[in-house]
Image (cartoon, helix red, strand yellow):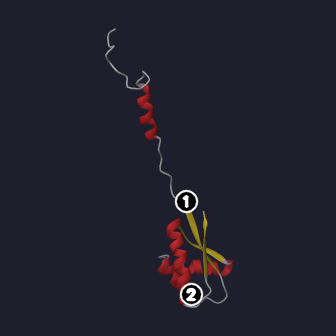
Amino acid sequence: MMGAGKSNRGNGGGAGQEDVVVERRTQTKTKKPSMYKVILLNDDYTPMEFVVELLKVVFHKPHAEATRIMLHVHQNGMGIAGIYPFEIAETKVRTVDELARENQFPLKCTMEKE
């Protein structure tokens, strides 16, 4: 009866179960956030210069890249201004819509999951 005074305190008599708990904790992985494409839609009224300035100010694109994106939108009907996590993409879409409305242009901007 040696060790009869020892208590296992509900561990089922095996020390291996404690290892399982630690192992489960190390299996937790952080999931990367979903990314969203912010898309500019072409129209026949918004000036090209306005779109270039918008790409520079809102999306922080250099002038040459902003011009390239604007031309792509103009020629193809739509183009990606950038790819961001949901909250940032949503804010950029809202900012584009507000600036276009303030300047009385019909420019539209949407977002879609990548």
> In the image, residue 11 lies at what x, y percent?
41, 26
Check disc 2 and report its element: helix, strand or loop: helix
Q: Is residue 85 visible?
A: no
Between the residue at mark 1 and the residue at mark 2, the CA separation in whole angstroms equals: 29 Å
Location of residue 112 by image quarter: bottom right
Report the disc number at residue 55: none
Check disc 1 and report its element: helix, strand or loop: loop
Of pointers 1 and 2, the one earlier in the residue sequence: 1
The C terminus lies in quadrant: bottom right
Residue receiving disc 2: 101
Q: Residues within 10 Å of mark 2 (few under 14, many from 20)?
A: few
What type is the residue that disc 1 sits on? Ser
> In the image, residue 108 lies at what x, y percent?
62, 80
Residue receiving disc 1: 34
Where 110 sits versus 48, above or below?
Answer: above
Q: Which residue is found at the position 41% from the left and 30% from the top?
A: 18
Where 98 sits versus 26, above or below?
Answer: below
Of the pair 19 and 45, the residue shown nearer to us: 19
> In the image, residue 63 lies at what x, y percent?
50, 81
Of the pair 29 and 18, the residue shown nearer to us: 18
